[in-house]
Amino acid sequence: MTNPMDYQFPQQLYPSFYNGGPPDFVLKHCAGNWGCYDRVIPQGSSGPLSGWTFASRHQARGETWHHTEPVPVPLMSPKNCYLWPSKPPNPLDFTEHMQNFFLDHCRDAFGCMAEILGDNFEQAQMEGVGRESVDNLRSTLDMKKFKMSPLSYSPNSLHAYCSLLSDVVPAVPNELLCSLLHEELTEQRDRALFSEGATGGALAFVPFPRGGSEPQRGCLVYPGNQGLGCLNFHRVEMQSRRGSFSLLDASSSDPFRFQLKGPIRQISCASLFDDCCVAVRSERLCGVWRVGEQNAPRLLQVVDTREVATCVSASPHVLGEVLVANESGAANLWSVGRGMQKVREEDVNLYFNAKSSWRWCEFSAHPRVVTYADRTGVELTDVRESPISSHTLFHINNTSECRSGERLILSRYLGDVHTFQHLITTQYSAYIMDERFPCLPMLKWDHMMRSPPMFCHAVCGSLGSSGSGARATKVLLGSQNSQEITLLQYSGGRAEASSSRGPLQALLRPRDSLRHLPVQIPHRLDLATSRLSSPAAGLTCIQKRGGRKGSGEECICILQLTEAGDIFYQTLKTEQLETSRPPAPEDEPILKEAMTSGAETARQLRPPHPQPVISDTPSDESVIGPTQDVAVPGFVTETPEREQRVLDANSDSSAEGREPKGRGRFLKQYGLQVVVNDEPDRVSRSYKRVKGGEGVRDNAAEPSSSDCATGPTERLPPVKLSNGALATWKRWLQKSRGKTPRPCCSQHLTVKTEDILLLDNEVRDPTEEEEARAQSLWRDLRVCMSKRSLLVHGAVSTPLQAPGAVPVADAVDTEAWRDEVSHRLTLAWQSEGAWRAWWEERLGLNREEKVKALRGKRKREKEAKRAAGRHLELSGSFTSSASFQLSDFSDSTGWSSAVDRGASSDTDGNLPQPEGFWESGMPRVATPSSTELERGNQQTPSSALTLSQALKRESTSANRRRPECLAEDYLTALFAPQDKTLQPHSYFLEEESTAHHPAPAPPVAPSSFQRSLLQDLSQSASLRSGLSQSSQGRLGQLKKKKSRMGF
Amino acid sequence: MDDLQNDLGPLDDLEDDNYSSEDNSSKEKSNLHVVYPMLAETSRETGFHRSTRACLEQIREALLHHRWQAAAEFMACYPQILEDPTIGASQQYKEVIWRMSAEILHNHPKSKMEDYNNIYERMKHSGVRHFLMISLEHSFHLMHHGHIEEAKHQLSVAESWRYGKESAAQFQKTKLIHAYRSLLDYIIWCDKKFTYSNNTEYYDLRDNQDMQNYFRQASVNLKEILKQPGVWDPFILSYVEMLEFYEDHEEALNVLNDYAYSDTHPRNPNAHVYLYQYLKRHGASERPLMKELKSLHLLVPSHELMPEYSALLLQSDEETDIQRALGVVLDLLDFACWRSNLDVWKLLKAIIQKLQLQEDWRNSVAEKMAARKDWWPALHFTRFHASKDAEENPELKGVKASLTKILCPDITLKYTA
């Protein structure tokens, strides 16, 4: 379909500079070449000023194309497919993969050595470390390196073996496995980001008959099945239905299928007359099929390219000639049935070292001149001459306004559009090159796509069919990873220089379609999301030219293949709204019926009283509202009374309840037939809408666009999803199924942690508690400051307690516990001496001493009887000395902290008291902090009163016991003075906490008390043999004072 | 302020690195993904930056999806970014605002000329570095809408504008501004010529001072831009026209020859066409014309002047010329757009008929066809071609069929009359 006028060359070209040298231009903004005219040329001949017009290279006005549906529609029902994670893998995750391998395939990972070592382990290990244990052992070992293992409590012996055998047990050495995995993951990541193998696209459409203007029939060639390894030739037909075009499978025919050995990467087809030659490229195989309207597809030949093939391109000039390029840099001209002819071979890149082995070949206007491209540029190579002569067509460096880092992505001969034009895309721009004037682009766009355009399809503008001259040529660029499709329009290249028409337009992407569709149940939503966002794999377009009678309008249908094997299509109509409207009423009644019935049903469905779910509907409403507001006027123009009803229904429901309104609205919006009872689950879920930010944006934008009613572009109501499309989508969503690459894994040993965690759950929130403590600390500090005292540990109220020990148990009634252990414990709490004495008594160690003491007692009794009058004075001196000791002690050390530890335990009420305590009658000083203490301290429940009561009781009980152990007490007091310290110590607690003594508490290790206890034990042990000098010396002062006790 | 500048420094460097680091092959692939610097998140961002970035993203999306009104509304908010002292001063933000605003105005149904002038004037003066670019675009806009005088005024203002060091881009912009101003001078010159020619004699017109002033003004700059490597078709055409008018043929030929044969210029087929047309206009003999067409043939063997060339060659009496004519026509027929052109096939037939007068015509034909014999049959003489030609152009089929035996004597073709 070449235009015979293609031989014309533009009489004048747009001025431009011709630069050499590497480009240093860096675009720092994201607006590309928006808004600029990019040179003008004068048109007109020497005449008056008014006779001149100027044509700009970028023309603001162009054809406007509108979508017929707001979403692309799936062409076929979904087949099974493998869904790969949409996020590219991180190469540094290889440890995780190793771990999975060890766990899931431990037999493969460790099988060999397990075979060999298993028997030995069985003999050596009594606990039966069998073959499987070795496997487990290995996995344990390896996982411990990377991550906490669920098996980490396996026996210690296993760990020992682990460290011993770590480098021999795996079947594949770890280092090797690591590096291989890393390499593989890196490659996978790169492939996920940009897989150059897919360049060109694996989707093609062969129209039958060629160039007809009837509703298009043709053969769609696409890869199918899992892994895209099956080549399908499917007859399709574009049908017009109720004014909108949709693509339907010819139900009569099933596709012809050819199963290939590898995934299909590229399909290139060229047709001549009624025959079409379809060249297919997979990784290392290239095949050529022949298909025509009359005859079934037939495989002509398959070749095995030893290197990875990067390009296949069928000749538009001679059927059966195919160009094949591969990664070794060779380009071959393959005449099917006759063999290969090497056309060109380059070891290095053409113009500079781009470190890329990607090569691309296309035919050109001359059947024996081919383009040879790599990432740095394109050359035109003449095949006929033996020392191959070639000249530059496109050169990154020499093309003006190339940017730094720009690389060629795709070069495509636009033979169908213009004999001499080539399209070249880079990651930033798209260029139209004319091979008659190489090196300088005729036209350049910044295509604004985020990932590089790898697929393209050019649609020739129909010539003069609409009477307004030649229409613009449409170029569709498709990117892989982000599924973008961009529509560019341009004209010229013959008598006039090429100029772009209108702004570029981004088309719909399958991945964005879910937000226009009813909400799915979560697992289906996930599945659909990942399936819809799988990278694009191909792009093609079916063009329907306007009929000669002017009845049909021009439209293009763009098909996009994704790697999941789905094909989506979207139809674009050119702006002829007035003519496209008339067919609409045909289907609108149906739509409206559904609408009103939807509203009514919604009213019936309304629950008697509002449910709590409603609370989130206002936000829902804010999302949907604008769309509806716009959607309603769309109907209004033709049937005002309908609108009234709709509005009534709205206001009704909004007055009475919100949920039903949402439902009604949904129904209206989609013209959904209400099927409440069929599948309650699906339908009820479908009422809700996605509340994505995208949705908000779209809808927020639209109402304002309807305000502005002058321009033709703005007058359009937003496109609504038609019934048919919605039904197709629903079917598709229900049927879509995907397999994740790692469908199952073996059962792992799991450790249940619920019981452990339960405890933690019951504990109060630690942060809250922490805060409360901090606040009480602040309070204490403030109090201390106001008193000009120091904030010592004792003055602090809450921090004294360990968190969680607040509810202090009631004082233990020691009388109630009369068994041996309880008695011993009670004594242990009383004093160490008492405890030791108990043990000594129990073991009979103190028999001698007892006897001795008894003797002494009797002796003393005798003496007492003799001097009966001196008894009172003795007791008086005792009390005075006790009080004196106290002041001494409080000066000395940080017993307080040790005491605190004791105090914090639950037997605070049972403070051991010396018998002389109450006799001493030490006045309790009432200070603010003491009240504080009573109010908020650890003894809160039992307060000072109960404490004193308990103490009194204790002291009385001690008094009662006194006759038995008095002498013993005295003895121990004599020999082990540390024991003595315990007695004032318990009192000291009381003193200290009242902050009577502002003595600073030097930091003492909390364990000092225990340490001293240990010391005491050892000392008391040595006491039996005799007095320890050191202990005597250490407590010399104490002894001195005690000597005043009158012993 | 210095601190701010310092803070900005590394950011810019980072951006530059993203683009310039292309040695690493693993980076190579990720580099192919376009990261638009203004849309990417930066390390030092405030909430304001985030929201303006989001706004920019919205404008972009709206522009890409042709929601002009939405874009306009977002655009109304976006210039706030200029108030931000840290990034608002950067050049690219101003350029983005200008470009996006202009794009919206281009497509918005309610855009008015005042809006354009407003945005052009404001953005022009908001920064020095893009003054020339916006001035140029402004003048294009005015020219496009027929305001030639205003456009010339804009260009004159931009012409006299000086700012600091000239970068390469600025240098080129200056040159372009000069050239376009001269182009407008030429247009005014044409206008004057037109108005004066109605009431004065042709020779008096040449002495018209007014016109000569315009010519002089224009010629200086036009001559200047022709020295730059590039494509200057409209400029050279206007310059040559004025030179022709003042009968400075020497200069005109010089300029045209220079444009066609200078190594610095790209190989522009139009340069040869202009030279050929000039020579033809001034009645040059066949030889220089053929020389011109020969060099054009080397450049573009499919050019529309090639039939003319082969016709010229055919008129010549030399044997080699006829063979050359055969070559030229065969080359033409290689290309798809000529393949069903009846005139060319007729020309081929005429050439072969003339060639047949020579003794060894078979050899010369075989020589030309040697490289073609394995694909020409498929290109021209298949059964499908036969049926198609019979249907669309029976005369063509007759001509073609008569030539099959001569062109491909060894092969039996299915292309039969």
Image (cartoon, grey):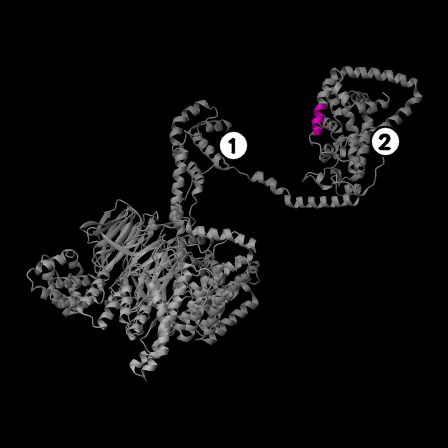
On residue A354, which mark appears? Answer: none
Quarter holding residue A849: top right
Could you tell me if residue B22 is visible in this image?
A: yes
Q: Indicate whether residue A1014 is drawn in magenta.
A: yes
Q: Work out which residue is located at the far bottom of the displayed protein and give it.
A: B199
| A775 left or right, relative to B292 | right
Coordinates of residue A109 in the picture (x, y in percent): 40, 34
- Left or right: where A818 falls relative to B414: right
Relative to A264, does residue B378 appear above or below in the rendering? below
Q: Secondary structure at mark 2?
A: helix
Q: Amino acid at mark 1?
A: Tyr
The answer as to whether the residues below labels 2 and 1 share one chain is: yes
Examine the rendering and report whether any part of residue A242 can be seen. Answer: no
Amino acid type, callout 2: Ser
Question: Residue B81: where, in percent of width, then height?
Answer: 53, 61
Specify start and end residues of the magenta stretch as a single range. A1008-1015
Residue placed under numbered mark 1 in the picture: A153
- Closer to the N terminus: mark 2 or mark 1? 1
Q: How many marks?
A: 2
A974, A737: nearer the viewer: A974
The label number, if any, that marks residue A920 in the structure image: 2
- A142 or A236, which is in the foreground? A142
Q: Which is more toward the observer, A391 or A936?
A: A391
The one nearer the camera, A999 or A433, is: A433
The kind of secondary structure element at disc 1 is loop
Name the spot of residue B175 as percent of width and height, x first: 39, 65
Question: Foreground mark, 2 or 1?
Answer: 2
